[in-house]
Image (cartoon, rainbow, N blue to C red):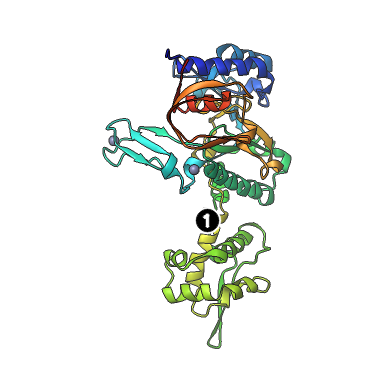
Amino acid sequence: MAELDNTLFIREMFSKFYSENFNRIEIPKSIENREFGFTLFRENVMIRHKSFSRADDLRDFIKKSVPSNAYYSSAYYNMPEAKMDEKGWLGSDLFFDIDADHIPTKCNKEHDSWICKSCGFKGRGRTPEKCPNCGNEGFEEKTWPCEICLEAAKLETIKLIDILLEDLGFSADEIKCSFSGHRGYHICIESEEVLGLDTFARKEIVDYVTGTGIDVTLHGLNEVRSRGSRIITGPSLGDAGWRGRAARGTYDFLLTATIEDLRSLGLRKDIAIEIIEKREAILESWRGGGPWSVISGLGVKSWEKIILHGLSLQSARVDTVVTVDVHRLIRLPGTLHGKTGLLKVSFPASRIEEFDPLKEAVAFKGGEVKIYVEEAPEFRFGDEVFGPFERQVVALPIQAALFLLCKGAARVVD
Ligand SMILES: [Zn+2]
Ligand SMILES: [Zn+2]
């Protein structure tokens, strides 16, 4: 059985895609002011500081050079090809990255693993910041775009879109959504209003959408004592901004909270039991002034803990580093992801609920390729489910085979 070079095969598929679908490559606004970057299959280095004055030049370049990954700058520059400090920064789109890597799902222990590049120490689940064995920071990572993780990323994206629309006042057509082609979503806002924001302003926006540093006593939680009795007031479900989110997060949390959940916030056992016992009354109370005085032993300090946990459920987990970086290179929509062979696809924010990444990011239809799969959990593309596979030869549709090859979980056979 003669083995073909995996990389050659992947490159051939990417080349086929770009020659047939070069019109799908999306051209960023003011292309002449953007910096482009690419990784090529042959040399595994990033080519940066490229620029193109016309859409056709960019498409031709991608068609001819067949990059494994293609990026553009969220920034606009006077001279995109110049050295970083000589480019002449003109402004930058407001960009958010939501990636399953930053969302703690239970399944990541099953499908994600890492190996320290320095000492070979291995682990499963989320990659640590530093190797627990040698303290170095470089890792070889294996992650998997599983359905549960993709759903978790989508939920964060839905929360982010809601905050952008309701609180920050962007309109739906300003919010450009895309699936990254791997494990997450991107949101890009190209409005005039955001272009000139510096790193600090962007950090404030991140703090806002992540609900960082909120003082709930400034959001309606209050205690009034009169003639020996105590009345606690708090936010209402219909309130605007984070005040309403504080109430809705608290509502959601108390709807299903267990004694253990409440105890883990530091509440006393008898109080936790009372909350569970009075769940119906708590839910009922939201129609009036809220549950703040329903549990007699529960004071402002304890409510604060509950509300803060509710807030954390409402916050959108975005990658801070990406949003505050005004020179960031971003994957170009309409190009293939080198780690999956899936397409980065854009879609209107209004479609987020119904969007199915494992259907819409499929770039290749039909075909069949024989591959040897080392190990892969069950996965789906469109309506078809594949695997699980373990040390076996299988014939798969091109997209499924390409995906496993890109993931390094398989090799091509004759
Ligand atoms: Zn190590
Ligand atoms: Zn998962």
Q: Position of residue 37 (x, y in %)?
A: 53, 21
SS of the residue at dot 1?
helix
User: Visible in this render: residue 82?
Assistant: no
* Residue 166 sits above or below residue 31 on the image: below
Q: Which residue is mark 1?
A: 312
User: Visible in this render: residue 32?
Assistant: yes
Q: Position of residue 35 (x, y in %)?
A: 57, 22
As rendered, which of 293 and 79 lies closer to the eye?
293
| Horizontal side of residue 236 vs 390, given as left or right | right
Q: Position of residue 46 (x, y in %)?
A: 47, 20
Which amino acid, mark 1?
Ser
The yes-or-no answer for disc 1 within 8 Å of ligand 2 is: no
The residue positioned 52% from the left and 72% from the top of the image is 276
* Residue 286 sits above or below residue 47 on the image: below
The residue positioned 57% from the left and 31% from the top of the image is 181
The residue positioned 27% from the left and 32% from the top of the image is 119
As rendered, which of 348 and 4 lies closer to the eye?
4
The residue positioned 34% from the left and 40% from the top of the image is 123
